Amino acid sequence: MPALDVILNALISGVLLGGMLALTALGLSIILGVLRLVNLAHGEFLVAGAYAGLFLLQWTGIDPLAGLALIGLVLALIGYPIHRFLLVPLAGKGPEASMMTMFGLSIILQNLFVLLFSADTRAIDRSYANVPLEFGPISVPQIFVMGFVISVVLIVAVHLLIARSRFGRDLRASADQPQAAAIIGINVSRVHAFTFCLGAACAGIGGTLIGIALSFTPTSGASYLLTDFAVIVLGGLGNVLGTLVGGIVLGVLQSIGGLTLGDGYRDLVGLVLFLAMLSVRPQGFLGHRA
Amino acid sequence: MTTTSLHEWLSKRAPLARRLVPIALLSLAAAFATAPARAADEIIIGASIPLSGPLAGFGSFQKWGYRRAVDEVNKAGGIAIGGKKTPVRLVLRDDKTDPNATAANTESLLSRDKAVALLGSCTPALVNAGALVAERKKIPLVTACNPLEAFKSVRKWTYVWDLFFHEPELAALPFKALRDLKLETNKKVAIFHDNGPDGQVVGGTLWPNMAKDAGYDVVQNASFPIDNTQFTSIVAEAKAKGADIVLIDAITPQAVSIRKQIASAGYKPKLLVIEKGAEPVQFAGALGKLADGVVVGGYWDPSFPYPGARQLATAFESETKLTSSQHIADSYAAAQILLDAIATAGSLDPEKINTAISSTDKTYVVGPIKFDENHTAKLPLVMLQWQSGKTPIVWPADRANGKILFPVP
């Protein structure tokens, strides 16, 4: 039985890491909720965000955390032509066509990363990512705390955007009844384009945090995609605040799994939860879309 | 279409069909006739290596080493086959760090590219996947980058040859260095290793046994899947148990993540050994100053007293503008051994090439190479340590060109 401080550290780390996982899943969640698109290139958007943070630092000296808005904007600008030229032409051709297109794009992006940046393992080297925050016997990675705060702020901001703003009203209408929304004058295609760009931006910001806290390669996206599916199923498909809840629950349970079974079983815990949730409560903890 | 009209249609087109048949047959005959002619015009050597995926850092060095050996032979006019100097062509395929792709690539190298001999990939999972295909097809394959016990454990090899380090020697390095350099610790050891073949051998068996024999106390031994990303629990446990010595066997992405998580947990072991993943330059590139003090076993350094060692590193660094790696040396030597064997055989017959490999007895850039009955040649080891982006040798004393940073900064 591990010591009490080890258990406490693991649980707190789980909450913090879960918050970061929620941010990596947020883009996937809102694109799925509004566009009904399973974005299989989401992992590559994360990796693109990590590269963007790395090169922002290397080329300009700007700290990636200070440049998160810029990174989000870059990813949104990358996302727009992808939506316009790859997804819009497939409207009305069923969900499979879009899904397979994004699968193809994920493979193209992986190869493009190798071609442009080599297949080397990278990490964004920041001194604040390598120190702990200590409160008595409790010691957690400082970057986890910073990542958690950024995640919560961003997730709440996206929630408020969707729940309170005029655009959010259009977005919810487009998600629930796209044809009815179009009839009452909502520009559904523009809402979809903006949502896709927002999803890409969130993924990019999440990827930058991963790059600072951990490491990444051109093919790292696939493993995060799996974890992100578990997060959004736990929280409720398309539910923004549910994504945060799902991330934290997954983070804590993975930490308990890591503590009791070993870190090698973290992903197993996540996938078992994913399957259990799908069979017991497929709508997730929060149960409805935002 | 009725029966009559079908008959008419066939009758009208029959002359055309009759004219096409001989053309098709001639084309087929020409295709078969030209295949041996192509093979005689060049000697094709194939290799499936990881040019993408987590092990791409190794693959890029292998590519350079293999190519350099082939280029040197071609500059000298090629290899005499049947009395005629024949150029060598190296065909490389990317296995994407996937053993299934290595096996498929090896099949393609033999059936489609018509390779007469092969060079290996990197790490046991990949090398062994390709080696088993070569063995089945009775085509000689020379490899490095595959620890010898992991290689020998697969089967009794006939056509595959391996030059690399011996895991028991690698596993013993930290304990010998601790003893010889008189490094003071609390003798508590934590071991983290992946569950790949070599991770299991080194981290699961050898390190615990050797630690016990050397009087150390293994307070933790944790294994994890090769692609694991989170290590907070095992790091927290090692910290709580106060291990001064941490021994890790993991590939580079995981090695980088573990090192960051050790630091961000505020854990400061005195000796930090990371085998496998800390070898490539990208490890230090990703971690910056955090790489300083990390120790890794090494089987080659440009300072080694073997012919061409210094020149090889200089050539690599001037061509690529990158810091050299030991992997350029073993891949270069493996290719040289294979090319020498083809020259000795004077033939493209796989059996003759294989016999020539078995007779190898020469000093290459990695040292003297002579294969034993298990088809292995052992490369002696030293201990390297990352210090400001370089890896000086810090043990043994007779080869050291740097002083160990202890404890880890």
Image (cartoon, coloured by chain):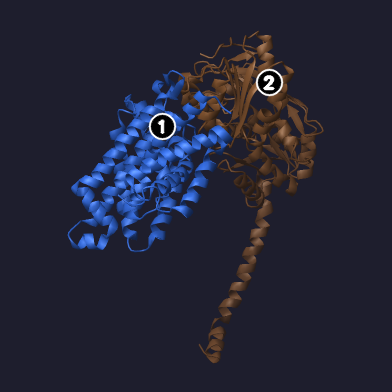
Q: Which chain is blue?
A: A
Out of A260 and A118, give the one closest to the viewer: A260
Give the class, few, some or many, for how many residues have Cα within 10 Å of label 2's Cα (few <14, many ≥20): some
Quarter residue B379 falls in: top right
In the drawing, does residue A74 fall left or right of residue A46?
A: left
Task: Provide the chain ID for the residue under circle 1.
Answer: A
Q: Amino acid at mark 2?
A: Leu
Q: Is residue B1 above or below residue A105?
A: below
Give above or below for B112 relative to B331. Answer: below
Q: Residue drawn 68% across and 28% down?
A: B202
Give the labeled residue for mark 2.
Answer: B381
Disc 1 packing (10 Å; few <14; some 14–19; many ≥20): many
Q: Which mark is residue B96?
A: none
Left/right of residue A22 with respect to residue B311 in the rendered view? left
- Name the spot of residue B385 as percent of width and height, x first: 57, 17
Judging depth in this view, the residue of B100 and B108 nearest the camera is: B100
The residue at which mark 1 appears reads as A16
Q: Which residue is depicted at the point 23% across and 62% down?
A: A180
Secondary structure under tag 1 reads helix
The chain coloured brown is B
Kindly indicate whether the residue at mark 1 contacts the one at mark 2 (C-beta within 8 angstroms). Answer: no
The image quarter in which residue A88 lies: bottom left
